[in-house]
Amino acid sequence: MNKDFDNNIPNFTRRKKALKIILFLLVISLIILAVQLFYIDNLSYLQGNLAIINSFLAFILLFLYIILTADMYVSIKRIKEREKVEVPNEFRVDAFKQTYFIVLDTVILIIFIFILVLSVVFKIGVFEIIFSLFGIAIFSYFLSAMIKSRKYSLEVQNRNIKVLYKNQEIEVLEIKDIPFVAFFGSGKEKVKKGDYPIMEICNIKGEILRIPLSLRNYWLMKKYFLKYDVEISDTYEN
């Protein structure tokens, strides 16, 4: 069941080698810097500049070492948390609330409305009006979709999935009626940092149910569908 997840485990061998090299260079740089500081009063103008450059180099190496180490630690911790997730016979999954993204889109929408009002009141130009109307339409759509999607939830009982909207049952899916499930990031094509996972369940009728998930629920639902050998497309892979 976890074979698909095992394929997503990063290979930290190169990262560890890179960290060893960075640490070695950092130690050398710090030793040289210590010597330069010890003889600082006797340094020539050129040697003083070299000491400054070396101090910057040491800072950059230290920064890289800390960032790469922290990133590897977070990745390993996330993998361990993922492995702890087990699929019970019955569980409930609530849609990811997307509060931050809703607030952000609301702010942007207000800005576009403000631009529209200014464009009309001060007769700035047709382009500004069209631009603001286009922005209002786009962000209104995304905002509406996010608000709607956060109201979904799933109640899973073995091979049956009960779909709820505002805690009211709207559909019951059976595993045998789900030929395909897709997972992708909220950025869709290219997953970037900060994206949250979205799940699309396609039934035999061709209907698609799209639900945003928290990271833990993404792991849970993916393991659930792997358990029952449902075909999965996953571009999120986290």
Image (tube, rainbow, N blue to C red):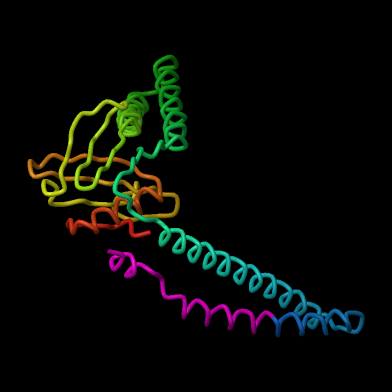
In reply to whether residue 43 is colored magenta, the answer given is no
Query: Residue at the location (69% across, 70% down)?
Result: 59
Residue ranking furthest to the front: 89
Task: Tell me where the magenta segment starts and ends, as one range.
Answer: 1-26
Depth order, front residue of 165/60: 165
Depth order, front residue of 123/147: 147
Query: Residue at the location (88% across, 80% down)?
Result: 40
Query: Residue at the location (42% across, 33% down)?
Result: 102
Residue ranking furthest to the right: 41
**Which image quarter is the C terminus in?**
bottom left
- Above or below for 29 versus 155: below
Residue 50 drawn at (x, y percent): 75, 80
Figure quadrant of residue 156? top left
Depth order, front residue of 10/156: 156
Figure quadrant of residue 233? bottom left
Main secondary structure type of the part rendered in magenta = helix
Residue 36 drawn at (x, y percent): 82, 82
- Above or below for 76 versus 193: below
**Which image quarter is the N terminus in?**
bottom left
In reply to whether residue 4 is colored magenta, the answer given is yes
Figure quadrant of residue 228? bottom left
Taking the image as shown, residue 152 lies to the left or right of residue 96, namely: left
Residue 84 drawn at (x, y percent): 43, 59
Can residue 227 be seen here? The reply is yes
Query: Residue at the location (30% across, 30% down)?
Result: 141
